[in-house]
Image: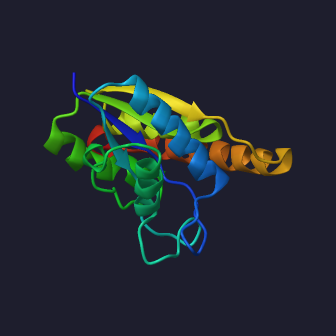
Amino acid sequence: MKSAIIVLGAPNDARGNLSSIAIERCQRGLAEYRRTPGAKIIPTGGWGEHFNTTAQPHGYYTRKYLESNGVPADDILECVESANTVEDARLCRPLVERHGFTCLIVVTSDFHLARARFLFEREFPETGLTFCGATTHLAEEELTRLKRHEEGALARLRQASERSTPDERR
């Protein structure tokens, strides 16, 4: 079984410093990497007003964090330069196919897990999938706001999926 750990992107600041959410996801990715011999890591995240406005893609900062925490550079694949979770799933497909991964471990935040699961299960119905939610340590008010955003985003995706054909869903 050939495994990849996909660490979904999260915000960084204007100097490339990872947010607490991004660090939590990286730390969970590190734990999965140490638990999964032979696995490769795929960082995601390009640019977007809501998460990264630097000259480098967000995945560059994820890579640097992972390397500084002991992951050999050869075990981290090229960054999937996505702007959102829909693109995370869609743009991972060519990389997954090119490397022949049969098992994917998708790492995100606990509050983001349901939407990531929906999108990756839709994109990779034939692939073994595991989902890992990093515990988010934010003020309750901020976490509640993020959970509401996720509920609305997932509801819109489900609604759009119900109106589409099977080919359009992929």
Residue 164 visible at all: yes
**Which quadrant of the figure has residue 100?**
top left
Image location of residue 166, percent across then percent down: 30, 38
Left or right, 153 with respect to 61, comes to right
Image location of residue 151, percent across then percent down: 66, 42
Image location of residue 128, percent across then percent down: 31, 23
Residue at the location (42% across, 64% down)? 46
Q: Which of the two residues, 163 or 44, is positioned nearer the viewer here?
A: 44
Q: How is the image coloured?
A: rainbow
Q: Which of the two residues, 140 or 29, is positioned nearer the viewer here?
A: 29
Residue at the location (14% across, 44% down)? 98
Left or right, 167 with respect to 148, comes to left
Which quadrant, please, contains the C terminus? top left
Image location of residue 131, percent across then percent down: 47, 29
Q: Which of the two residues, 131 or 67, is positioned nearer the viewer here?
A: 67
Is 30 placed above or below 64 here? above
Residue 115 visible at all: no
Which quadrant, please, contains the N terminus? top left
Left or right, 149 with respect to 160, comes to right
> In this figure, what is the number of numbered marks?
0
| Residue that protrudes farthest toward the bottom in the picture | 55
Residue at the location (66% across, 52% down)? 20
**Which quadrant of the figure has residue 60?**
bottom left
